[in-house]
Amino acid sequence: MCVACLRTQVDISEGIPKQVTVHFCKQCERYLQPPATWMHCALESRELLALCLKKLKSSMTKVRLIDAGFLWTEPHSKRIKMKLTIQKEVMNGAILQQVFVVEFVVQYQMCDDCHRVEAKDFWKAVVQVRQKTVHKKTFYYLEQLILKHKLHQNALNIKEIHDGIDFYYGSKQHAQKMVDFLQCTVPCRCKTSQRLISHDIHSNTYNYKSTFSAEIVPVCKDNVVCLPPRLAQSLGNMGQICVCIRVTSTIHLIDPRTLQSGYFFS
């Protein structure tokens, strides 16, 4: 049998689905990559091409993929068309090449992150930053540092309340990173607590919500500080009445009478 007749008799694309479903989240505009990964992919991008080909990988084990590319479709049509070129060896060593189109149907499905946001149960950890002062100089300073180091990008929500700010995070690791940043930036005292939300007795998994409380010392630059006698003695017998000249991760003081300086951790 000649190659032309073989092509009419043998369909090497048999077993490869011509229509496949792809799940897309409208809220965050991400595609589902099984089993549970959501990723951003622009239309007709290499990432979307790789995601679609993974849907066909199990059915293309007996053929050789030569080329793959997108065919233009309307962006609102919820259809992605891909043109595939494959080769396969058939009888008597003859190699057939075939071009066909696979249509991917985009179905809307809300991802887990967006589902938690809609259910008002979206945060896993909160960092409560407090400072009992009448001014907000420390928070203005923290705001600039947070923007500089881009720590606000991982926060799901930021709320300003009396005497402080609450940072809400989707994972405990991001909240712990924020707490470590605060401890390296300003003198503060941190406490941690957990609240059990749910418990699966079959898989023995626990769902907690964590709360990190960070209380910043109520001392700012140019404040007059009265030191305890023991602390003043440990700083080189400084006077008990000092002026704060700088606040970093430590508190820097100066004695206005002797100009002796010192610092200590809160």
Image (cartoon, grey):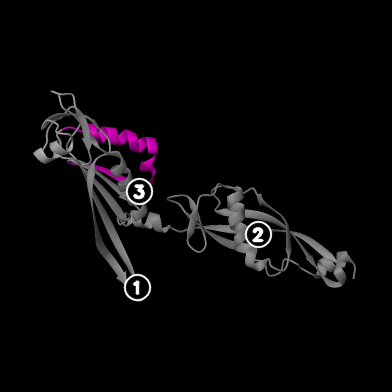
Question: In this image, 17 relative to 209: left or right?
Answer: right
Q: Quadrant of the N terminus?
A: bottom right
The tag on residue 177 is: 3
Q: Which residue is mark 1?
A: 204
Helix, strand or loop under label 3: helix
Three-letter amino acid code at the position of disc 2:
Val
- Is the Cβ of the residue at disc 1 closer than 8 Å to that at disc 3? no
The rendered magenta stretch, by its main secondary structure, is classed as: helix
Residue 118 at what x, y percent from top left?
A: 34, 55
- First to last magenta residue range: 135-162
Helix, strand or loop under label 2: strand
**In this picture, is 6 found above or below 32?**
below
Q: Which residue is mark 2?
A: 102
Q: Residue visible at 27% across and 49% down?
A: 127
Badge nearest the viewer, 2 or 3 = 3
Badge nearest the viewer, 1 or 3 = 3
Residue 137 falls within the magenta-colored stretch = yes
Foreground: 260 or 153? 260
Foreground: 102 or 188? 188
